[in-house]
Amino acid sequence: DTAVSQTPKYLVTQMGNDKSIKCEQNLGHDTMYWYKQDSKKFLKIMFSYNNKELIINETVPNRFSPKSPDKAHLNLHINSLELGDSAVYFCASSQPGHSYEQYFGPGTRLTVT
Amino acid sequence: GDSVTQMEGPVTLSEEAFLTINCTYTATGYPSLFWYVQYPGEGLQLLLKATKADDKGSNKGFEATYRKETTSFHLEKGSVQVSDSAVYFCVLNNAGNMLTFGGGTRLMVKP
């Protein structure tokens, strides 16, 4: 059973396009996250949702819009893609109180050409 | 704010060598500390954790001890294998939803 899943695994698109990445967790966790990992493997949190409500919104361009239809899903929509958006995007989930360890999805490699 | 500093890689070792990856942190209060591992092409997996001072986390032959006096959480393994080749992240959580990541250390183990 996959705990945290993301689709697609790879996404190649042109500048200016709009794309979405989907994330689902079957762990029953209340909190979900989106991270961006750059080419040097540095990880930066983008957003966090707790039970469908936004609780962390780091300095991210407003071209990025997370959407949580229910607490098991957190999707990431990106408008007007730019070359600098090329990265690996990871979804994660956690349950507050469980020493805050997070469970990560396999990642989505986005390439903007 | 909180921060985590870990040694830059890559670290290249021969199989069965001893591994140490240094990690130090800066934080107020009493954070929990983690090591996550990222194998090629995969997401991050929790390797081990320690939630209070002097705790030792261990898993798959890896160990790390939470040292509050030196604000460190160094990762060690007595005998590495080729399959241990990955990127290792030292991570801190200070009683909230945000994790603070170190920059990652790439380990390459040669046969």
Image (cartoon, coloured by chain):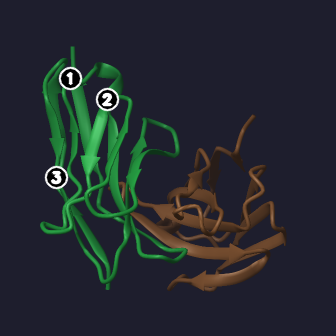
Chain colours: A brown, B green
The residue beneath circle 2 is B61
Q: Given the image, on which type of amino acid does mark 3 rest?
A: Asn
For label 1, the SS is loop
Image x and y of residue B31, in percent: 37, 71
Q: Earlier in the sequence, mark 3 or mark 2?
A: 3
Disc 2 to disc 1, C-alpha distance? 8 Å
Q: Which residue is mark 1?
A: B79
- Residue B41 locus on image (x, y percent): 49, 37
Say which mark, if any, is on residue B22: 3
For the C terminus of chain B, give its image quadrant. top left
> Tags 3 and 2 in contact by the CB under 8 Å rule?
no
Q: For numbered disc 2, what is the local secondary structure?
A: loop
Asked whether, in this view, residue B15 is left or right of residue B48, the answer is left
- From what the image shows, is residue B109 above or below residue B39? above
Q: Mark 3, chain letter? A: B
Residue A79 visible to an observer of this rendering? no
Q: In this view of the protein, which residue sits in the foreground, A111 or B68?
A: B68
Given the current orientation, which residue lies at the most extreme right position?
A69
Contact, mark 1 vs mark 3 (Cβ under 8 Å): no
Amino acid type at mark 1: Ser
**Disc 2 or 1, which lies upstream in sequence?**
2
Q: Residue at x 70, y 44 (%)?
A: A3
On the image, the x and y values in percent for residue A4 come to: 69, 48
Q: State if disc 1 and disc 2 touch (CB < 8 Å).
A: yes
Say what secondary structure mark 3 lies in: loop
Quadrant location, the N terminus of chain B: bottom left
| Distance of label 1 from label 3 (alpha carbons) | 17 Å
